[in-house]
Amino acid sequence: MAKPKTLFHGSNSEIETGFLESSKPNDKASKSNSQNGVYATDIFDCAKGMSLTGEQWAFVKDYTEKDFKVIFVDEPPTPKKKRFVYEVSSETFKEDPKGSHQWVSKEKVKILNITKYSTEDLKQYWRMATKEEKEEHKRLHNKK
């Protein structure tokens, strides 16, 4: 796949500095999801869904699924909260892992455009975990 010119980053935080800063995520389940960097995707709808994350425990099985959903383990996303999708240049990003639609930059990235939503606008992008998914995810993360 050719590298796209722009990528998208979903967030539940309004960023007023004009830049996305590199940070360390708390996902320890995968090496490619736990490196220090700015994460983005070439799939706009995926970024919309990811804007729901960050407050409650949630995960995604496959970003490339046609019916992409963020899966919440214990609590749903905070209602009536603003959500943001930031469009950024792909210049400093590398796809990691290859073919995943997940891109990572080790540098801070200038925001080119911002699209705003509310939790209510994004109902089709999330669901609650099934009992089996909850048990599996808690086992993977050593939680009770």
Image (tube, grey):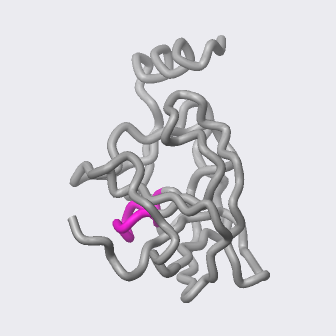
Q: Residue at x 34, y 57 (%)?
A: 101
Q: Position of residue 61 (x, y in %)?
A: 37, 37
Q: Is the residue 5 above or below the residue 51 in the image?
A: below
Quadrant of residue 38 within the rendered picture = bottom right
Q: Residue at x 24, y 71 (%)?
A: 2
Number of numbered markers: 0
- Residue 3 in magenta stretch: no
Magenta portion: prevailing SS class: helix
Q: Position of residue 90 (x, y in %)?
A: 45, 75
Q: Is the residue 27 above or below the residue 93 in the image?
A: above
Q: Residue at x 39, y 57 (%)?
A: 95
Q: Position of residue 107 (x, y in %)?
A: 65, 67
In the picture as drawn, the residue positioned furthest to the right comes out as 17
- Residue 46 in magenta stretch: yes
In-front residue for pair 134/23: 23
Q: Position of residue 48 (x, y in %)?
A: 46, 66
- The N terminus sits in image quarter: bottom left
Q: Is the residue 116 above or below the residue 128 in the image?
A: below
- The C terminus sits in image quarter: top right
Q: Residue at x 56, y 88 (%)?
A: 112
In-front residue for pair 47/121: 47
Q: Which stretch did the figure color magenta?
A: 41-49
In-front residue for pair 125/35: 35
Q: Is the residue 90 above or below the residue 135 in the image?
A: below
In-front residue for pair 120/73: 73
